[in-house]
Amino acid sequence: MWKRRWFHVLILALVFIGGAFYWLVMESDPLGEKPFSLDIAAIRHLANSMPGDKPSEIRVERIASFTFPAAAIMAGDSWTQQTLPANSYQLVFPDRTIVIDSAMSQEQANAMGTTSGFDDAAYERMSKGLRAASLILITHEHPDHLGGAAAIAPQVIAQLRLTRQQVDNLDRSDPVTFPKAALSGYQPLEYDRAMAVAPGVVVIRSPGHTPGSQIIFVRTANRNEVLFLGDVAWHIANVREVRERPRLLTMAMREDRSEVMGELAALHGLSLAEPQIAIVPGHDGQVIDDLVEQKVMIHGFK
């Protein structure tokens, strides 16, 4: 009798563990999806609304890299190790530059404890680019996107345009911090849904991964169009499959899965309707390599 009872207990425990594993690691869908509007016609209108030359080049620096299993990038994927680069992008105008995201410093990368590589020369070029930029935009308030600017905050705070939501949630950037004086009297960027910030450059609110997440649309002088997603998606597979990161990871990062899934669905629809738009996830090295080969991007900051 006792053997049968323990057998039933074991079966129930295995069912419970299996169910929990599926829900936390394998299953993608949230309990509900929050619709996300991505009106590309309106975004293009905003991109064309500011007078002046659009950027002639998009340049990229690969500062650091992380290693994660594919199953951490997209729920239900394999346990094969994948490299996730931390990048910074430079928009080159005839008379100025804009930088999108700033990766992190070596010290910050060490504090995070998850990097598998760091390019000192790329970091130095990026830091120089940050100091020379007329505007610095950050896709969201996580250390591997904000850290480089925070490391030299007193020198670049005038150019750094954090949004209100990013400033209000800088606890998400731990272990990266700003010097207390750097943000004294700081006036953040405030907008409702989308806003042009330069000719050909539009910021689009996309909360979910973090409260301050924003997608950045760029239209170049030669009419290339690029959407920088930040970490709405880590890899293009998230967009193609409309699959989120595993729930266990998104719970740890305090994501709103319903918002992210709505954004992934909208991006998937846009990718089918407008395949010429380059969609750049936060950490997909192959996408960057392909865009460099297609001459949409150029390796190395000016």
Image: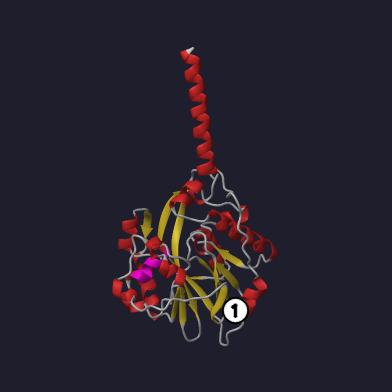
Q: Is residue 149 visible?
A: yes
Task: Identify which residue, 213 or 290, lies in the foreground.
Answer: 213
Q: List x then y, in percent, for residue 36.
A: 61, 63
Q: List x then y, in percent, for residue 150.
A: 35, 70
Q: Quadrant location of residue 33?
A: bottom right
Q: Quadrant of the C terminus?
A: bottom left
Task: Identify which residue, 128 or 121, lies in the foreground.
Answer: 128
Q: Is residue 138 visible?
A: no
Residue shown at 50% from the left, 85% from the top: 94
Give the residue type that dot 1 points to: Ala
**60 lies left or right of 36:** left
Residue shown at 54% from the left, 61% from the top: 287
Q: Is residue 220 magenta?
A: no
Instruction: Please give the count of numbered marks on the rendered protein.
Output: 1
Task: Identify which residue, 224 or 180, lies in the foreground.
Answer: 180
Name above or below for residue 17 compared with residue 268.
Answer: above
Q: Is residue 149 magenta?
A: yes
Name above or below for residue 281 compared with residue 13.
Answer: below
Task: Identify which residue, 26 or 168, lies in the foreground.
Answer: 168
Residue ID for mark 1: 47
Residue shown at 45% from the left, 65% from the top: 87
Q: Quadrant location of residue 277?
A: bottom right
Q: Which stretch appears magenta?
A: 145-150
Q: Main secondary structure of the magenta part?
A: helix
Q: List x then y, in percent, for residue 25.
A: 51, 43
Name above or below for residue 9 compared with residue 184.
Answer: above
